[in-house]
Amino acid sequence: MKKEAENRIRLDKLLADLGLGTRSQIKEMARKGRIQVNGVPEKRADAKVDPETDQVAVDGALVAVARFQYYMLNKPQGVVSATEDNVHDTVISLIRRKAGGPVRKDLFPVGRLDIDTEGLLLITNDGELAHNLLSPRHHVDKRYFAKVEGRLPADAPERFARGITLLDGTKTMAAELEILTEASDDGAETVLTIREGKFHQVKRMFEALGCRVVFLKRLSMGSLVLDESLEAGEYRPLSEEEVEELKRWRQ
Ligand code: URA
């Protein structure tokens, strides 16, 4: 059995052990929405939590602090992938605003999406995992849905597969292009998988073929797939399985 599974205990037991009430009082507190696990209200007093990795708060005050936190955000447009910004809302301020309780101060986004890009963004305070996912040596797959304007050349998938020479002369690694709609003068809907993280990479790859990206959304990063039930601007904690898979992930 995995170590994490052994550590999990019922929320009412954890809070009762911490002296916060009897099990029935805790059940009532949960029912009233007074308990948050990883910033999200938890109404089931029998929900299992890991005191080492989950952050539990009652009435907004932390009672058990996890060392590492992992959130999946469906980043909306108009928000920057940073911890602080003087002009725009950041992905971290968005999480703080929406959290039912306190969140750790050391959270940061793993990599960046442009201000007008939507989709999957991992938010954590686990520097080692972030480093592994972002390291150019690890070539972590990133899948994007991209809507482009302009006519895609007929051989676009082959050209992406060979790697694209960007307009500044830089060569990208091989990428996988799937065209979802018939390419026409009106543009096309595509899914592109890249294995690097160059600045504005997707937009610049299409630009090199004479097309302009008009909508971009990240669908996955390594083993982590955007939960389609999350509306733009919503987030949820990763499950233990998702965290473990990401830690094991190797191309
Ligand atoms: N490539 C881009 O051009 N923009 C993003 O936000 C992500 C990848």
Image (tube, rainbow, N blue to C red):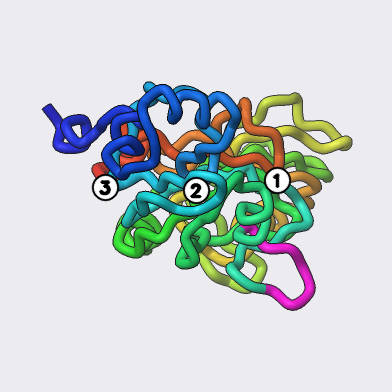
Residue underneath mark 3: 52
Q: Is residue 43 left or right of residue 211?
A: left
Q: Secondary structure at mark 2?
A: strand
> Which stretch did the figure color magenta?
85-91
Quick check: can you spot residue 86?
yes
Q: Give the Cα separation between the discs numbered 3 and 2.
A: 35 Å
Q: Are marks 3 and 2 in contact (CB under 8 Å)?
A: no
Q: Secondary structure at mark 1?
A: strand
User: Within 10 angstroms of label 2, few (less than 14), some, or many (20 or more) residues?
Assistant: many
User: Within 10 angstroms of label 1, few (less than 14), some, or many (20 or more) residues?
Assistant: many
Q: Give the Cα separation between the discs numbered 1 and 2.
A: 13 Å
Predominant secondary structure, magenta span = loop
Which callout, 1 or 3, points to the residue nearer the camera?
Answer: 3
Q: Give the Cα separation between the discs numbered 1 and 3.
A: 37 Å
Residue underneath mark 2: 194
| Residue type (three-letter) at the residue carrying disc 2 | Ile
Ligand 1 is within 8 Å of the C-beta of the residue at disc 1: yes
| Residue type (three-letter) at the residue carrying disc 3 | Glu
